[in-house]
Amino acid sequence: MRRSLIDILDLSTAELDEMIRVAEDIIAAPQRYSRVCEGKKLATLFFEPSTRTRLSFEAAMYELGGHVLSVAGANASSAAKGESVADTAKIVSCYADIIAMRHPLEGAALVAAQNADVPVINAGDGGHCHPTQTLADLLTIHREKGRFDRLVIGICGDLKYGRTVHSLIAAMLRYEGVRFVLISPEALRVPAYVTDALQEKGIEYRETVSLEEAVPELDVLYMTRIQRERFDAAALYERLKDSYILTPDKLRSAKSDMIILHPLPRVHEISVAVDADPRAAYFRQALNGKYMRMALILKLLGDRSEPEPLRALRTPQEIAARGLACRNPKCIGKVEQELAPAFVLAGGRYRCLYCESDAQDALSGGDAPKRKEQA
Ligand code: CP
């Protein structure tokens, strides 16, 4: 098993700093990197739609002098015939040196990494994580604000299913004096595992439904789309879809040096009139994603260390099912039957190894019993 990127916590702060340095070097002197991946192949396996992530990965590999093998769409590979993620990863390892995978099931990239012989990059697993979007976010914050410490970060929109949100918060927890304002409808608040992490780290945060009330104190406003594809109930999506629309008028009370980020695509949540505002950094952010993906490909292809820092695979407290079940129907552990249910104990709660949802009692369907953390 090779070093992979499944969760942004798989990268140390020093590694993130080094990747930002490499990305800046690529921006300054791209010709120096134009042949460094000669003879290497990146496989992009995208089982969900994508414009930025897939194309920026492919552009990144071409600009490093490498080649790309691509599967775009759930029906374009043998997954459509029922092939498992585990088998797909084993097979693609025979043809490619590195894999970037997007999948609708939460935990799918972890299962791919457990089975591949080459590095696997999580390019988005359902509503769970999107660590390479966070790499784009971090380079943008670094370039626009010049620091990560002491920032007030407002995150607005779909915080429940927003995988970019979960990964960004996880990344920023490591920096001094960061404070979050989490702006969402009641129905789309961040999952418990995210607020638990904030509390465990002693990070100041508050939750609000009002964008207008939050804007004046923010250094970074991270807008997100209400994601139609994550809702089981169309009526709920229709009710919530236009909860937030950022307009020039709403920016009147914002700091003059606040930056506006968005992982994109946008629907209505940022009016096109905002694009002309110099604080609107979201198109620069999309470009930065390519440079950080170049830095990531270089890092993973060059890294021969044991995958010890891979947080989700390093599970000293991993425990077998023993009467527990994952409650998330979009978890890979629920769908790929041969996967043994596995849980980690964090903050006294059992969490699914694959998707981090709270476990439930398999028999009663109620909450799993609380347990003290093991030493
Ligand atoms: N931000 C992002 O993941 O965009 P795509 O869905 O277009 O890849």
Image: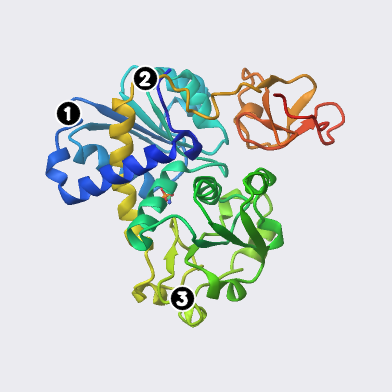
CB atoms at circles 1 and 2 under 8 Å apart? Answer: no
Q: Position of residue 149 (x, y in %)?
A: 46, 56
Q: Which comes sooner in the sequence, label 1 or label 3?
A: 1
Residue 51 seen in this snapshot:
no
Work out whether residue 312 or residue 363 is closer to the camera in this orientation and state it: 312
Q: Which amino acid type corresponds to the residue marked 1 in the rendered image?
A: Glu
Crowd class of label 1 (few under 14; some 14 to 19; many from 20; radius 10 Å): few
- What residue do we see at 34% from left, 20% from top? 304
Q: Secondary structure at mark 3?
A: loop
Give me the disc on residue 255. 3
Of marks 1 and 2, the one in the foreground: 1
Vertical relation: 317 (above or below) 213:
above
Q: Position of residue 224 (x, y in %)?
A: 52, 59
Crowd class of label 2 (few under 14; some 14 to 19; many from 20; radius 10 Å): many
Work out whether residue 205 or residue 336 is closer to the camera in this orientation and state it: 205
Q: Which amino acid type corresponds to the residue marked 2 in the rendered image?
A: Ser
Residue 61 seen in this snapshot:
yes
Q: Position of residue 32 (x, y in %)?
A: 13, 40
- What residue do we see at 37% from left, 64% from top? 281
Q: Secondary structure at mark 1?
A: loop
Where is the N terminus found, in terms of image quarters?
A: top left
Mark 2: C-beta under 8 Å from nearest atom of ligand 1: no
Give me the disc on residue 248. none
Mark 1: C-beta under 8 Å from nearest atom of ligand 1: no
Of marks 2 and 3, the one in the foreground: 3
In this rendering, position of residue 345 left or right of residue 280: right
Q: Which amino acid type corresponds to the residue marked 3 in the rendered image?
A: Lys
Vertical relation: 201 (above or below) 359:
below
Q: Which residue is mark 1?
A: 38
- State how far apart marks 1 and 3 are (Cα): 46 Å
Q: Position of residue 278 (x, y in %)?
A: 34, 73
Q: Which residue is mark 2?
A: 93
